Image (cartoon, rainbow, N blue to C red):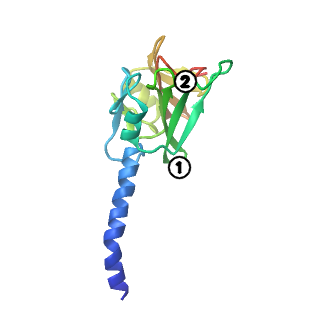
Amino acid sequence: MLNSMLATLAPVVEALLRVIVGVALVTGCSSGSRSLEVHPDGRIGPLRIDASTEADIRSFAGKPSKVERDFWPGKKGQFGRSLIYSCGRKCMTSYSINQATGRLSDYWTQSARFTTERGSRVGMPAARAARLERKKLLPGCGFPRYIHLRYDDKHIFVLAIWNGRVDSIGYLGPHTVYYDGLC
């Protein structure tokens, strides 16, 4: 009798596991085998800073774990919103949308599934990431150190370093919802 019950449940369990793995891959969990590249020009996998809409993000990443409203001190009204996706224990990926443009303005992830063009990823030793990127570790605020992959008047693309390892990958675009940048 137990064998017949297990035989009946096996296809259901297999289908459920496929759904769980599929959700994990879509939402940016580090367990996925295929990595997604983040580029200095603002491409994040199939998404792009200042081009992708909330519908594009949801089509790619699914339903967010939560949505946060973004405000700037001293300004009236909501400035944007961030779609937050859980990618595991103490791991999140955030896609922010500027209220005025309706487009992806910022991105921040702690998921090792995302990599830079040169192969740096979350969890990697900072010294190795600096060598791969051919950039120096620089002092920062918010995190003790950063590796700046793009840093100009309108774009901040960094690897944030904590305890000697890449903690996260961040991209703040020209229409950022982060009023204080990296500080």
Name the residue located 49 percent from the left edge and 18 percent from the top edge. 175
Horizontal side of 176 relative to 29 (left or right) equals right
What's under tag 2, amino acid-wise? Val
Name the residue located 54 percent from the left edge and 43 percent from the top edge. 66
Tag 2: Cα neighbours inside 10 Å, few (<14), some, or many (≥20)?
A: many
Q: How many marks?
A: 2
Q: Can residue 119 be seen from the camera position used here?
A: no
Residue 99, percent from left and from top: 52, 24
Q: Please say if 166 is above or below 146.
A: below
Horizontal side of 136 relative to 26 (left or right) equals right
Name the residue located 49 percent from the left edge and 34 percent from the top edge. 168
Name the residue beneath numbered marker 1. 89
Tag 1: Cα neighbours inside 10 Å, few (<14), some, or many (≥20)?
A: few
What's under tag 1, amino acid-wise? Arg
Q: Quadrant of residue 133?
A: top left
- In this view, the mark in front (2 or 1): 2
Q: Which mark is first along the chain, 1 or 2?
A: 1
Q: Can residue 17 be seen from the camera position used here?
A: yes
Q: Please say if 72 is above or below 67.
A: above
Q: CA distance from mark 2 to mark 1?
A: 26 Å
Residue 50, percent from left and from top: 41, 21
Q: Nearer the viewer, residue 44 or 78?
A: 78
Q: Nearer the viewer, residue 62 or 4?
A: 62
Q: Quadrant of residue 49?
A: top left
Name the residue beneath numbered marker 2. 177
Residue 68, percent from left and from top: 57, 36
Q: Quadrant of residue 76?
A: top right
